[in-house]
Amino acid sequence: MEPLFVDRLLQIADLFQRDMARAFDGTGLTTARVHLLWVLQHAGPSTQQTLAQLCEVSPRNITGLVDALEKSGHVRRAPHPTDRRAVLVELTGAATKTMARMQEEHSQLNQTLLSAIDPADRAAVERGLSAVATHLEHLVAAASTGTLPTIEGTP
């Protein structure tokens, strides 16, 4: 019997998690820490409050993540240029190099995975994955607000 579509998605998610765990083994980096580095790479220097919002975690979680990343030399805290009460978190030079390498590996993996799909099917696969991701986001949002529709489609 062929696995259900959702089972394939869960298999893919599990494979990504295992590969990330393997890649970060011995580095002191966790998935949460790498996510924060990724956010900083794209957002630039940010306050911890902004980072908590962008990472969708509590300020307490961000403090712990920043503390650990500061200790490992991946981020530094710097005075905010216009608000003397605020502190900015920014990538160190070493972390910038690490993130550039990760970005390159990310692009290579993207190309490797796309090469497994017949070029004529790629646009359809990408549309399908986008549709599934968008629909799942809506389902998760609805479930978190208690407005998930019943099987008949009514709340």
Image (cartoon, rainbow, N blue to C red):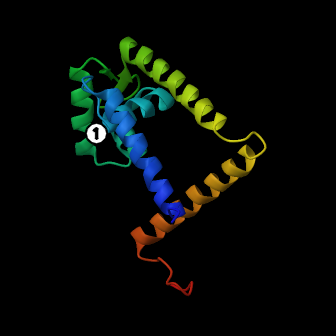
Q: Position of residue 43 (x, y in %)?
A: 48, 32
Q: Nearer the viewer, residue 74 or 26?
A: 26
Say whether residue 127 is left or right of residue 78.
Answer: right
Residue 53 visible from this viewpoint: yes
- Mark 1, secondary structure of its residue: helix
Say whether residue 21 is left or right of residue 129.
Answer: left
Residue at position x 49%, y 55% from top? 9
Residue at position x 27%, y 17% from top? 73
Residue 87 visible from this viewpoint: no
Above or below, 107 relative to 117? above
Q: Position of residue 60 (x, y in %)?
A: 22, 44
Residue at position x 50%, y 55% from top? 8
| Amino acid type, mark 1 | Ile
Q: Nearer the viewer, residue 72 or 8?
A: 8
Callout 1 crowding tier (Cα within 10 Å): few <14, some 14–19, many ≥20: many
Above or below, 135 relative to 155? above
Above or below, 139 relative to 53? below
Say whether residue 144 is left or right of residue 58.
Answer: right
Q: Position of residue 65 (x, y in %)?
A: 26, 34
Q: Which residue is mark 1?
A: 62
Say whether residue 104 is left or right of residue 129.
Answer: left
